[in-house]
Image (spheres, helix red, strand yellow):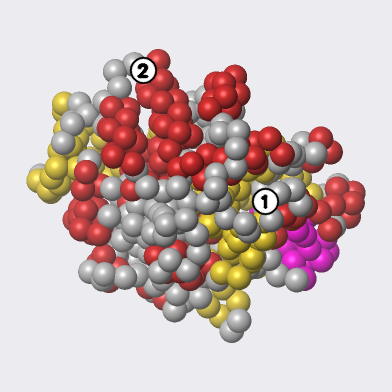
Amino acid sequence: MISVALKPKDINERLDTRLISYVSEFYLLENLTARLVSMNEDGSYQLELASKIDVITPQEYTIEIRESYFSNGDRITIQDVYESLARVLKFNSSHVVLKDVVKSINVKDGKLHVLLFKPTKSFFYYLSLPDLGVLHRTQYSKDEIFGRDFVNCSSGPFSYLKKGSDYLLVKNEHQRIHSSKYPSLIKLVDPFGKDTADLILTNQVDLGQISLESFFINEDRFLKDSKLTYLGVPSDALTYISFNKYNTNVWSHENRQWFKCKLEEQFKVPERLNRMARRSHQYFPPESKAYVDESEILESKKKCPQARPKNFPTSIKIHTYKTIFKVSIKELLKDLEKIEGLNIEIIPDVETSRAMDMMKSGAFDLFLNVMSTDFRVPVEAINFEYFSPESRFRDHKGLIKKLFDQYQDAGSDRNEEELLKQITRTMNEEIEFIPLFHAAIPYFFNNSKVSMDTPSHLFIMDFWKLKN
């Protein structure tokens, strides 16, 4: 058994491939479900459960699968793949609106036949998501799936288990997709727990995520321990202020623009924090294809209104998660409150499980959010922020959707990149959010106890790639 700092889900909490709200759920479902393909560090794809994918035409595919088994010993069939995708077509999912992409699916001659409405550049990426992970008949027959539904059966390298107060991932001895050399048991430890730092430093937690709050408090102790290897880059997660799309009375476009301009002018990231964070003026980091040159951003500042709008709020209350200082940099958030003339107050009063319900009820105007980002696939963020059931941003007049559809049909890499950049420009112009900073997530592994095939922050939670 190895111990991992990854927030578990209670077996009675929702843990559903169609509604993945937080990155910890994403990581869990990657380990609990088999996916047809996977994506490498360079953004290329390799077959996983799929043994063969034939492109009949640019919008028609046939998929065959290799021999593998659910954790209860049942063989995974092409019908299970069909039913899992049909469930997503019925309900949608967080990272892909499949019904806008797939015209029909059916099983014929032992193959899955998929017909798209039109050629779609992101189709293979969608197949790599846990949103489209394969489910057992006891799971895909349900409208909602909970942690307990992965206890007796899962298609992935692990199944789920609660033993006493511990949450465990249990090796699926029947799966045939990956090497069988990975650990038999993974004990999940809350990275935000008050004792987690001490557990890491005493070799009781072997890899995972360190909360930013804990990292800064214990930085000297962490960095002096030669057994700990750190992974992560200052583009792992974006902290931003979003305007509640369900409550738009106060924040006119003029007010948003003036507020954004004041933050552009006065909010900074100190140089001593540069290895952990970078000031951001757009959603995507410099490593992303969707990144727009900073000179364009500086040019847009010329549009800033000089005078404070007459109806601009005299005080600005920004609600956020109770755990915000564990996943974002407290010093920078406190600096927001010090900006002269804005009277900002950060209010960490929202339970993560209640955030979307509170937003839809209009409980707040502004929300401070942290979004994990993957620079390889900007389409994931665009899908989630604009088109998913838990989207935070409005798509004014369908402009983002129009550009997104054009991107899916892009005929060249150059055209693809330009369309992504145009999406970024449109996001900046519409001001559904104000980006503050990108920051590193401190991932770690104990190099004396764990060996990783690919030591990268992108794959540290792929526990089937570990050797102990």
Judge the density around disc 1: few (<14), some (14-19), many (≥20) Cα neighbours within 10 Å: some
The residue drawn where x is 50% and y is 64% is 364
Q: Which residues are magenta?
A: 195-215
Image check: 146 left or right of 297?
left
The C terminus - image quarter: bottom right
Q: Amino acid at mark 1?
A: Leu
Judge the density around disc 2: few (<14), some (14-19), many (≥20) Cα neighbours within 10 Å: some
Q: Disc 2 to disc 1, how far (Cα)?
A: 41 Å
Q: Nearer the viewer, residue 218 or 86?
A: 218
Image check: 60 left or right of 415?
left
Q: Which residue is mark 1?
A: 342
Q: Nearer the viewer, residue 104 or 257?
A: 257
Give the mark toward the camera: 2 or 1.
Answer: 1
Image check: 119 left or right of 449?
left
User: Reading the chain from its start, which is encountered first: label 2 or label 1?
Assistant: 1
The residue drawn where x is 35% and y is 52% is 388
Return the x and y of residue 448 as percentages of the image width and height: 78, 51
Asked which secondary structure carries label 1, the reply is loop
327 magenta-colored: no
Asked which secondary structure carries label 2, the reply is helix
Q: Amino acid at mark 2?
A: Asn
Q: Nearer the viewer, residue 208 or 79?
A: 208
Q: Which residue is mark 2?
A: 415
- Residue 13, relative to residue 296: is it above or below? below
- Residue 374, relative to residue 157: is it above or below? above
Q: Is residue 38 visible?
A: no
- Residue 213, relative to residue 13: is it above or below? above
Number of numbered callouts drawn: 2
The residue drawn where x is 26% and y is 71% is 142
Return the x and y of residue 151 as percentages of the image width and height: 43, 73
